[in-house]
Amino acid sequence: MFVSVKLLIGVGYNKCILHDNEKINLLFCCLCLLLSIETHAVIVNDVTGMTPVQVAAVVQPESTQQVAELIKKTSGPISIAGGKYSMGGQTAIQGALQIDTQKLNHVIAFNPEQKLLTIEAGASWRQVQELIDPYGLSVKIMQSYADFSIGGSLSVNVHGRYFGEGPIILSVEEFKIVLADGSVVVASPKENQDIFYGAIGGYGGLGVITEVTLRLADNVKVKRVNKVMPISEYYRYFSQHIRSDKVAIFHNAIIYPPDFKKVRSVTFQQTQEPVTIASRLRPLVKPTLWQKQKPKIIASSAFGKQLRKIHDYADYVRRPVMWRNYEASFNVASLEPIAYKNKSFVLEEFFIPVERFDNFYPELIAILKKNRVNVMNISVRHANQDSGSLLAWARTEVFAFVIYYQQSTDERSKEQVGVWTRELIDAVLANGGSYFLPYQLHATSEQFQQAYPQAVQFFKLKARIDPENKFSNMLLERYRPETVQ
């Protein structure tokens, strides 16, 4: 066993390695680390390139024990990073020690018969897929892209296009978490329930999730079917045809800019037909020149967006049959480059009770058009109610409106994005909905409190188990009450 500590400085780093058989005192190394933190710093960022944060150092522990020892010897603050796909400083704060979980990626236990996997939280979903696919198994709930870390996914309580599912908390058996005092506890719906429902969706505020036990699903064959309709017909179509579809595995609807009048309902249904795509996972390849240019073309003009529609009409004529794991193994490289010199592609996401769909979408479209938002795509997903996380975004059955857009990165443009984002949040709140927290921090404190009414209980729990506020990041610091009673 060894401890590897990286202090990233500019483009290089200093590495300190301790070997147990050399009997080097772990405390001495931690003290050295703290001294290094005082004299060296590094800038970390997220995928948009718009949130640079100077942290004291970045460390990469490789086991739960190493995380516990590190936390014991660090006075704080500490932030936690996984895949770094959040977009508003959720993995960092000024002057913190950032725990990078990339090397915390070992398989702990795998029981194919019971469809259970215990794995360290820094592992990616792709790593899980490569492990379980030969056993005919698939991830039950995850994002559409497989690059994200498991721990990060729990921390934001992700969802995907899995029909009849919802937030990832619905697929978690238990997890290990290292608290601010360095203690390691197991949390589940039956054990340490407060920590279980606080840490999932808690953005690293309670501690470092190090090991996770997940329930898995069968890797079945799926066939893609779709139907284009006016947006005014989608909710009725969903209610009559999708909600009762017992073989639907994935479902989403694509709302097409720039007029937002048409919706394409896309469903992947379980089938016994032979596959037309033999690969079981999507290949890990670099994007082609066309793939790199396609987002630029779509973002460049209304004509580019019309070309996207034409491309989709041609592509969706096909009804391919593939494995569930193939459809679930997209990689973010297919979207790159995301950040340019003066512009970046960004996500925002809003949740609406399903019965409010027809009330909300006209307001959504009006706000986007009024503010001339350069929308690439709006994807509508379905999610069942959360099982009880304190910062639950699905307090009822909801539709998620995932908006993928391009913005300029100068300060004035960021302010303009904040204006229309807050307008959208007001419209969402008026319809009894919420918004997703992994993105830019444009919401006011009042909007946050209304969207997440149990936030007070979350911060009370945090104050109890992390009284010195050791675990922090820009999201938590922005919305944490000054006093918690």
Image (spheres, helix red, strand yellow):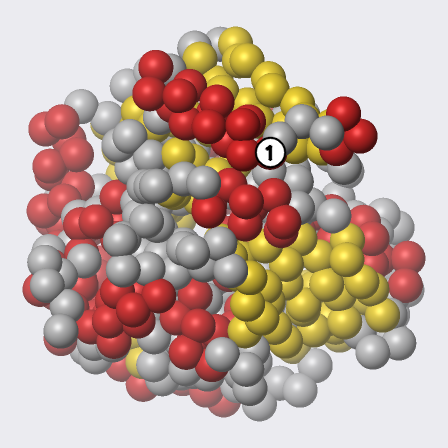
The part of the image, by quadrant, that contains residue 482 is bottom left
User: How far from the left and from the top, in percent, is residue 454?
Assistant: 25, 76
Q: Mark 1 points at which residue?
A: 26
Would you say 431 lies left or right of 158 here?
Answer: left
Q: In this view, does 240 lie to the left or right of 247?
A: left
Tell me residue 396's x, y (percent): 36, 84
At x 85% / y 70%, what residue is drawn?
111
- Picture residue at 48% right of the left edge, 22% below the top: 32
* Residue 102 location (% of width, % of height): 60, 38
Question: What is the x, y in percent for residue 28?
Answer: 54, 27
Quadrant in which residue 288 is drawn:
top right
In depth, the one of 263 and 286 nearer the eye is 286
Q: What residue type is labelled 1?
A: Leu
Q: State the SS at label 1.
A: helix
Q: How crowded is mark 1: few (under 14 residues within 10 Å), some or many (20 or more)?
A: some
Q: Is residue 386 above or below residue 410?
A: below
Q: In this view, does 130 lie above or below 206?
A: above
Tally the numbered discs.
Answer: 1
Whether residue 326 is visible: no
Foreground pick, 456 / 216: 456
Q: Can residue 101 be seen in this view?
A: yes
Q: Please name the residue shown 54% across and 49% down the image.
A: 68
In which quarter of the view is residue 402 placed?
Answer: bottom left
Q: Residue at x 77, y 57 (%)?
A: 108
